[in-house]
Amino acid sequence: MNLKNTYTIAFLVSGGIFLASTMTSFAGPSNGSNLGDCYNNWITWCNDHTSGYPNNCYGDSMDHCDSIHKASMTEIPGFKVKSMRASALRKAKRANVKLVTPTVQPLRRAN
């Protein structure tokens, strides 16, 4: 009976450790100390965890940063916020989309 309790406790402890280690891998990055840091942290996270820009991760994460740092956004001019968003999006990894070139058709002339 004592051996059975030992196995149960060991199983619960190992399950808890496994759960804790996987939960931290699904957690997002820090929100940073300012809006620019938040944008950069989340763009990097989206680059690592998604197939690339464009997808919802990038827009949703920037909206998340806006909601977290909305108090500081009242102090920053609108053009500066747009500039920070554009600067962060320049670091976004582009999706691997194969571009197909159109086939050139011969020019037809009437006789």
Image: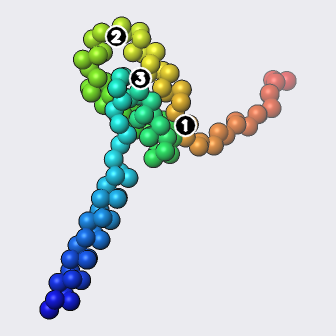
Inter-mark Cα distance, 2 to 1: 27 Å
Q: Residue furthest front?
A: 2
Q: Position of residue 106 (x, y in %)?
A: 80, 32
Secondary structure found at label 2: loop
Secondary structure found at label 1: loop
Q: Position of residue 51 (x, y in %)?
A: 50, 45
Residue to which mark 1 is pinned: 93
Quarter containing the C terminus = top right
Q: Position of residue 67 (x, y in %)?
A: 26, 26
Give the residue type at disc 2: Ile
Numbered label attached to residue 102:
none
Vertical relation: 4 (above or below) 93: below
Give the residue type at disc 1: Lys
The tag earlier along the polypeptide, 3 or 2, is 3
Q: How busy is the neighbourhood of tag 3: few (under 14 within 10 Å), some, or many (20 plus)?
A: some
Q: Nearer the viewer, mark 2 or mark 1?
A: 2
Q: Position of residue 73 (x, y in %)?
A: 30, 15
Q: Residue at x 76, y 34 (%)?
A: 104
Secondary structure found at label 3: helix
Q: Nearer the viewer, mark 1 or mark 3?
A: 3
Give the residue type at disc 3: Gly
From this viewpoint, is residue 77 visible?
Answer: yes
Inter-mark Cα distance, 1 to 3: 18 Å
- Residue 75 picture quarter: top left
Inter-mark Cα distance, 3 to 2: 11 Å
Residue to which mark 3 is pinned: 36
Q: In this orientation, which residue lies closer to the viewer: 59 or 16?
A: 16
Q: How busy is the neighbourhood of tag 2: few (under 14 within 10 Å), some, or many (20 plus)?
A: few
Residue to which mark 2 is pinned: 76
Is 86 situated left or right of 71 in this image? right
Q: Residue at x 33, y 32 (%)?
A: 31
From this viewpoint, is residue 56 visible?
Answer: no
